Amino acid sequence: MRLDKLLGNNGFGTRKDVKQLIRKGTVRVNGMTEKDPGSHVDPEKDSVDVLGEPVIHQEFIYIMMNKPPGVISATEDKWDQTVIDLLSENEQRFEPFPVGRLDKDTEGLLLITNDGKLTHELLSPKKDIPKTYYAKIEGVVNEDDVAAFKEGVTLEDGYHTKPGFLTIIASDSISEIELTITEGKFHQVKRMFEAVDKNVVYLKRLTMGNLLLDESLELGHYRELTVEELNEVDPRKKG
C-alpha cells in the first residue's frame, strides 16, 4: 500500500495533507524517516509513525445504520441524499458502501462496509441469508396469505419467489406483520403483497442474517458493529 494512502485511510488528513507531512520528514517507517509519499509499506509488517504517533492500521469498517425514509441506499446520487452522506468524514474516508439496498421509503437495518468479500457472502443468492421485515399492510392479512407465502408467490413479471415466512401480528384494515425472506429482488416485499392483492404502507427491516437492528438507534443514526455482532454476521467465521 502507498504510504500516503495508508495515512489518509487512518485519519491523518487528506491525500494532500499527508503528502505534506511526509515531505516535511515527520513520518518514519521502521524507524527511518521516509519522504516519498509513493513509497510502499506493508501495514501488517511495517512500523509507521507520524511525529512519534504510531499509525494503527484499520482496513475495514462495519457500520449498522437505522436507515431513515427518504434516503437512498447508494454511495452517491445527483438528486437524493444517500446513506453515505449521513456518515462523518471519518467514516467516509474508508469509502464504504451499503450491503444490498433498502427502498427509498423503507427504513431500518442497513449494513455499510468496505469489505467486498463479506458483502459478496451476504448477498450471494446461494447463501440464502434470511432478512426479516416488519410491515403495515393495507388490507386484512389472513392465513391464506401465510400459506401462499410459504409456497412462494408469483410476481407480476412471472418470477416465482422462494418461500417467505409470514407472521400476523394484527389483522385489520391495516394489518401488522413480520415477514422473513431469503431473496432481495427489487421492491420484493411490496411486490409479494401485491401478488395477494394487498399494499404495503410501511416497511422496516429488522434483521439480516444473525444481525439485529439496535432499536436504540434513532432514524438516521449509526454505530460500528461490535466484535460479537461482526462474528455473528460474517458467514466466513462460521466455517
Image (cartoon, helix red, strand yellow):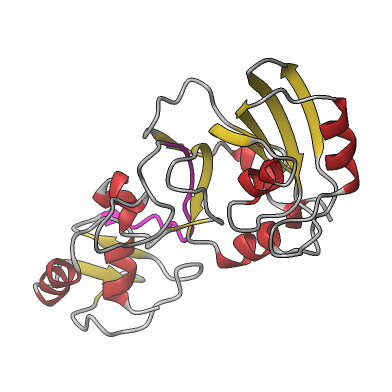
Left or right relative to 111: residue 120: right
The residue at the point 31 percent across, 72 percent down is 5
Residue 123 image offset from top left, x and y in percent: 67, 60
Residue 89 image offset from top left, x and y in percent: 25, 51
In the picture, the quarter occupied by the N terminus is bottom left
In the picture, the quarter occupied by the C terminus is bottom right
Left or right relative to 154: residue 29: left
- Residue 56 sits in quarter: bottom left
The foreground one among 90 and 164 is 164
In magenta, the rendered stretch is: 53-67
The residue at the point 72 percent across, 16 percent down is 171
The foreground one among 199 and 110 is 199
Determine if residue 206 is in view: no
Vertical side of 34 occupied by 71: above or below: above
Magenta stretch encompasses residue 54: yes
Residue 143 image offset from top left, x and y in percent: 87, 26
The residue at the point 32 percent across, 62 percent down is 76
